[in-house]
Amino acid sequence: MRKEELRKLRALNATKEMMEKAWPEKNKTVEIVKNSCGTYERIIRKYNLFLRCQNLGGYLKTALFFPTDMEKGISTPKYEVFLNVEGREYLTRELNEEGEEVRWLTAMALNLQGISWSMQKRSNDTKGIFLSRDADKSIQSLPINGERPGIKDSRALCRIDAWQQEVKDEQTREKEKKQLAPWDADMAIIPELPKGFEEWLKKEAPKKNYIFYDYQRGGARKGYCRHCGKEVQLVHRPYHRRKGKCPVCKRESEFICNTKVRKVNSEWGDRGQLIQRIKGGFVVRTFTIYYEVKTDRYWEPDYVVWEERRTLYRGGAVARYRYTMYKNKYECWCKVKEDSYWEEGGKLYRKNLGQLRRAMEGQTTVLDILQREKSLKVERYLDAEQRYPVIEKLTHAGLPGLAVEFADNYYRIKGMTDPGETGLAKELKLDKWRFQRLKAGIQSVNALLWLQYEKASNTQWPDDLIQYFAGEGIGPDGIAFVKKKLPMGKIYNYVVRQAQKSKEAPGQVLATWRDYLNMAEKLGMDTQKDLFLRPKDLREAHARAVELLERDGMEKIAEEARKKFPKADGVCQTLGKYEYQDKGYCIKAPGGIFDIVREGTLLHHCIHTCDYYFDRISRRESYLLFLRKEGHEDTPWYTLEVEPGGNIRQKRTTGDSQGDDLKAAMPFLKKWQKEVRKRMDEEERELAQESERMRREDHEKLRKDGNRIWRGRLAGMLLADVLEQDFMSAV
């Protein structure tokens, strides 16, 4: 509808009859209402709304008048509703008291300002609405659902609203069709699944496998492997729920005695992936699979398989689709905007890769890399390749290992490359000579970092040194604590010698060396002297430094911590509300910093040597509490890092580890957490929310920086992963 034409239409002002009926003496009565709050007057009107209509062939113009305006002598309408019956459109114009245009609205009739809920309800039987016989006839002529149900329904305003709703639904369906059309076109080019793919998916994609056997005295000799799909001869005696390997397919499996359980199942989240060629490119399809096996018919597993997502790669364009609810109406393939970095990969179907590679030669490097990188996350690699052209350049230059590592951690690319440079060597911040050394040696991010560091230092180190550290996953940051004190050659020789002597990994040697130098400086040793800087036996020197600090230094460490964190002692003295005892265990709160230093010293972990624990206590971000066994309240057992709301961040015992003895205490800890939630006041709830936010930010930063653990049984793992696994929520 064109607004210029609508403005030219004759104005519909209130008639003399309408003005008379809206007059207060005829339309308004006052009722006295009494209730428990007192007495008040309630105004009741016979007519709450007046309507006039003008039928203009294919158009219907309806003017809406409110009695509150008409009582002031205003005869111009508040709204003019225009309905294009043939064109299936509607539009509303709002007017002021002088009848001048204020604005145009697309709202439906019952949603206009001033149409109250009670007026909408009254309009169901036309009470409260005045309209002429001609107006009523015009409104009843509005076709709804292709009919003219005037006899069935005599509503006025609600009928206009119903017609508008029908038009709106038609417009919505039309918009949805336009949106879905290109999506459906993309889905139409997806090819059929290869023959045998579903059988492969059921067999290979699940990570968990079972071997079922019937109990026999002396041990079963036969079993049924789900992966093989047939009976196999067992070499060793099986035990229920023990793990072993299938003698035929060599797959890691769990043995299940058929008489001990009714059913077993796979893990949720097992996935399989398939790459297929499409017009202009290829598609990566991801399937999720789940199976359940009832032991009374173990040869017939029940499988559930559904296709989760499709990612189309055509030229430089990427289109992601997920099978999900469309606007909460029905399920279909919907285009989504997601980052593939967080997408879970899956077992890749490789039977068609050779044919696909030959058909698409030169179009993508991922098919070449997939031939040797079996654990590659396809979508992450492809997205990284789209964002950062240097990845494709690395593959063509004979550096596929570095390309894969960059793709898996592409947040590091920006800091390690210079895309403005011409030539791959300069883009990697290297010269041609060092670039050739990178190609000839270990192709990894750490090797590139060492060569960049060598170039920045304007020196040359032996290839053995760079390959040794890079091969062990150690970058230049790993020797930052000592690089200003010793030449690189001496650092390398010392680490190699100590690793051979202690039979520890080089990363562990560096961690021990770093801890030793930290303790040596606290003890007042001159670490500039080679005697203290490079002790002959690093492990022995480390143990001696720990012993010295334990014997003489606990009070000294506590005093230094009090100076740095004067609030920590006071916060510790308020933690009595967290103490709890029940069924063989208890939680004790430290009386001050000295108790924390004593706990860390006796358990040989780091809570008393890391300032950030005292900093968190001072800011009330987290607290350190002691888990004890009943009857041994003064004997350190486990140290807990706890948030104000009861969330447990860490649980550590001797040597910063966890033992099997903690499992028995888990029900007690959960019960304690519930008690903490009950005791919380409003201030502590706010502290708990802030603590949770800071924890998430800290874990995100640790993951982004790639921080790893270099000591103990968790050596090599990402610190963020370890902390998240140890986390125990109180909710």
Image: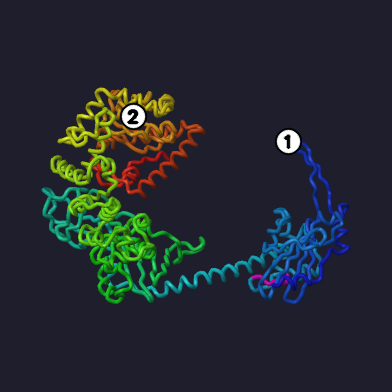
Q: Quadrant where the N terminus lies? A: bottom right
Residue type, mark 1 in image: Ser
Residue 204: % across, % down: 25, 62
Q: Residue at x 42, y 26 (%)?
A: 566
Residue type, mark 2 in image: Phe
Residue 286 appears in view: no
In-image side of 567 versus 71 (left or right): left
Q: In the image, which disc is placed on residue 626?
A: 2
In-image side of 199 versus 54 (left or right): left
Crowd band around label 1 with a 10 angstrom C-alpha radius: few (<14), some (14–19), many (20+): few
Magenta segment includes 141: yes
Cβ atoms under marks 1 and 2 closer than 8 Å: no
Camera-side mark, 1 or 2: 2
Q: Secondary structure at mark 1?
A: loop
Of residues 218 and 670, the one nearer the viewer is 670
Q: In the image, which disc is placed on residue 223?
A: none
Q: In the image, which disc is placed on residue 36?
A: 1
Q: Is residue 402 above or below residue 583?
A: below
Q: Residue at x 40, y 25 (%)?
A: 569
Q: In the rendered structure, which disc, 1 or 2, sits on the residue that comes first in sequence? A: 1
- Total of numbered circles in the picture? 2
CA gap between label 1 and label 2 equals 58 Å
Of residues 8 and 703, the one nearer the viewer is 703
Q: Residue at x 23, y 64 (%)?
A: 372
Q: Is residue 567 above or below residue 119?
A: above
Q: Quadrant where the C terminus lies? A: top left
What residue span does the magenta drawing correspond to?
140-144
Residue 365: % across, % down: 30, 68
Scheme of colours in the image: rainbow
Q: Residue at x 29, y 75 (%)?
A: 361
